[in-house]
Amino acid sequence: MEKLLVLTHVDESGEALTKASLEAVAAGMEMAGAVEASVTIGIVGARTETAAQQVAGTAGRVLAVAGEAFAEARYASDAAACEALCRAAAATLVFAPASSRFDRVLPGVAYRLGGFSDTHVTAVAKGETVEATRWFYRQRVEAVLRRATRPWFLLLEAGTRAPWAGSGNAVKVETVAVELPALRTKVTGVRAPRQGEQTIRPDAKILFVAGAGWTKKQADGKVHAAEAESLILNFLHVADASLGSSKSLVDQSGENQAVLGFLTHLNQIGQTGATPRHPKGLSTCCHGEEPHVVGWRFITERRAVSLDPNCGWARGKADVLYVADAFKVMAKVNALLADRKQASN
Ligand SMILES: Cc1cc2nc3c(=O)[nH]c(=O)nc-3n(C[C@H](O)[C@H](O)[C@H](O)COP(=O)(O)OP(=O)(O)OC[C@H]3O[C@@H](n4cnc5c(N)ncnc54)[C@H](O)[C@@H]3O)c2cc1C
């Protein structure tokens, strides 16, 4: 019988589990039912009491590695914590969120335990045996993997299932002791790629994509970069949207041209960019070429605003194309959304 361990970690608050961790818990519970495995939850964090309550209802053991050394992501302490949890649970299958914290640690832990790890897993199911699905080659090839090697570590992509919403009695937590190696790395702070505006929001309901058209000369022969910035930021605020970009637009930022200052290559969607998951997407001032649209694979409903009735979006790439001036459309949309927000307050 498989022994399934779901590894989780706390978020920046230091107390609550990340949403991706709770998604891994939900995946673990589903799989445990399918293969009749026992489930253990492992938690890593400075304080783990609140986190443990979030996994109420999972019925199996709840193990925790706690203490100040585990407050921050650091390879040596996180690898030691995960290794200790795997050994304590005698795990044969390990599910974990594909977070930056665990992505860099778990392949090493798998090596220590003589196991195997697979990353970017988007689905797990029971076929003949446990099967993991992931995409290769920029989401062009989908593979279903089976492995005889145990323990098998599966790093599950965030946003691919509903998070565990447990309820029930107080959870009894078993603390697992960890022998820490000498810690040479001290976390002194976080340096984010962008200061100020947070524009990439993986959990947003809508993705707003800005294309190079926002910084091109408009009908009056002039560039309106400042107006473009304000229209885009306004929309992100009123719609709580995540901001994506075409490659052309972020490349301009790198070349110090008249651009939108809040964009970096992290915003780029497409073949050489990201493939985010949002229920809806709105593309503006973007041509909708294949290398860009391939990054929209997991956007369920696609709409675009472009002046060009022959753009890529018009050729079957969007569900709805508005052939219109995005400056005018977004000014109107922002006004309507602001009214609606005010009415609901
Ligand atoms: C190997 C390779 C990999 C690539 N990878 C990526 C990738 O990952 N992501 C990516 O995005 N691209 C990628 N590209 C580039 C891609 O092919 C396109 O060049 C790029 O997406 C074009 O960006 P754009 O549509 O914003 O700009 P443009 O092609 O310049 O289009 C601008 C659009 O804005 C419209 N417009 C202008 N003003 C307005 C207005 N007021 N209202 C409405 N519409 C307006 C214009 O009609 C035009 O359609 C890649 C290319 C190659 C060769």
Image (cartoon, rainbow, N blue to C red):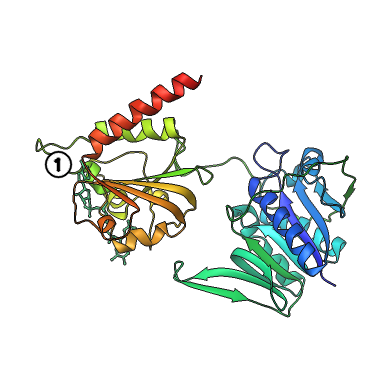
Residue located 40% across and 24% down the image = 338
Badge count: 1
Q: Residue at x 82, y 51 (%)?
A: 58
Q: Residue extending furthest front?
A: 320
> To which residue does mark 1 refer?
217
Q: SS of the residue at dot 1?
A: loop
In x, y percent, where is residue 34?
76, 66
**Camera-nearest residue between 287 and 99:** 287
Q: Residue furthest left?
A: 221
The yes-or-no answer for disc 1 within 8 Å of ligand 1 is: no
Would you call the spot at circle 1 few (<14 residues within 10 Å), some (14-19), or many (20 or more)? few
Asked if one can make out residue 26 in the rendered structure from this viewpoint, the answer is yes
**Callout 1, which amino acid?**
Lys
Q: Which quadrant: the N terminus?
A: bottom right
Residue 257 visible in the picture: no
The spot of residue 87 in percent (x, y) is 84, 64
Ligand 1 image position (quadrant): bottom left
Identify which residue is drawn at 43% across, 24% down: 340
Position of residue 342 in the picture relative to residue 145 (left or right): left
Q: Which of 294 and 303 is in front in this view?
A: 303
Left or right placement of residue 277 versus residue 123 in this view: left
Residue 7 in the image: state x and y as whole percent: 74, 56
Q: Give the answer, above or below, for where 193 lies relative to 27.
A: above
Q: Relative to residue 282, is residue 134 depicted above or below?
A: below
Q: Percent x, y for residue 327?
A: 24, 35
